Amino acid sequence: MSGGRAMKEREFKDTHVVLGSRWQPECFYVREFLQRNQLKYVLAEPARGISREIAKRCGDVPVVITPKGDQIVCRDGVGSLAEHLGMKTQPAGGKYDLAVVGFGPGGLQAGIYGASEGLRTLAIDRVGPGGQAGTTSRIENLMGFPEGISGPELARKSAEQARRLGAVRTTSRDARYCTCTRGYLQETRRARYR
Ligand SMILES: Cc1cc2nc3c(=O)[nH]c(=O)nc-3n(C[C@H](O)[C@H](O)[C@H](O)COP(=O)(O)OP(=O)(O)OC[C@H]3O[C@@H](n4cnc5c(N)ncnc54)[C@H](O)[C@@H]3O)c2cc1C
């Protein structure tokens, strides 16, 4: 194998391939999901060859090819993809003291406080941790980071801190489809695309 090819293979080793159009909202959502969960991806627009064949089979639905070569058809939003990637999409049973909706900087901070005070804390996000801040390359005005910090790094560290303190995070869950009755959180229907 040539040095250049070996280098390219190393570079793309952990990369997911998203088949879809950059203008398609469903495809944008899938890419946002991968980015927010810090998974590398490339977008392959179905122009020719194998990607066109898959696209024809799946219609307008984006398809993700994982680094292992599995093809996930994202028909129901990112739920099956999250499950396939081994992410937690269902909270463990039992009772929670606190449910935080949204794992942007506000929710991450609330989750960290809650869990550090010993509250059994559940965090629900429809995409992944970081919120808007997770998309920015540099945050300069955050206390404790004199050199600044990138949004994805802040999201990763904060989510790790929340997890270490015991907060349980579920992804691809949309609070619009949850109701809270007599202290029980119930999902009325599964989230799809926004
Ligand atoms: C490009 C960019 C650069 C920025 N740079 C800076 C900066 O340098 N300094 C600074 O102070 N601020 C910056 N900001 C602003 C900062 O990112 C926001 O103020 C901050 O992210 C707000 O945090 P939040 O947790 O309130 O909301 P958000 O970041 O919006 O997070 C909300 C979260 O809730 C989830 N969510 C929403 N609805 C639902 C639902 N129904 N069910 C489940 N989950 C849901 C979303 O997926 C998201 O993860 C920047 C913003 C952008 C876009």
Image: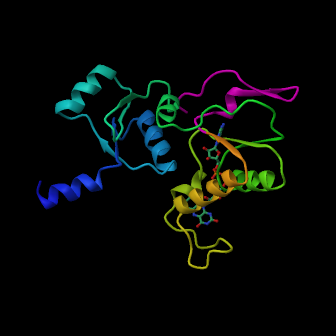
Residue 116 is one of the magenta-drawn residues: no
Magenta span covers which residues?
Answer: 171-194
Residue in the image at 34% along x and 42% along y: 67
Quadrant (top left, top right, bottom left, bottom right) of the C terminus: top right
Of residue 16 and residue 25, the one placed in the foreground of this image is 16
Residue 177 is one of the magenta-drawn residues: yes
Residue in the image at 16% along x and 55% along y: 5
- In the picture, residue 91 is in which quadrant? top right
Q: Height in image: 79 above or below 118?
A: above
Query: Residue 176 location in percent, x, y?
Result: 68, 31
Residue in the image at 38% along x and 31% along y: 62
Residue in the image at 24% along x and 32% along y: 51
* Drawn side of residue 21 relative to residue 192, left or right: left
Query: Residue 22 location in percent, x, y?
Result: 35, 41
- In the picture, residue 185 is in which quadrant? top right
Query: Residue 89 location in percent, x, y?
Result: 60, 33
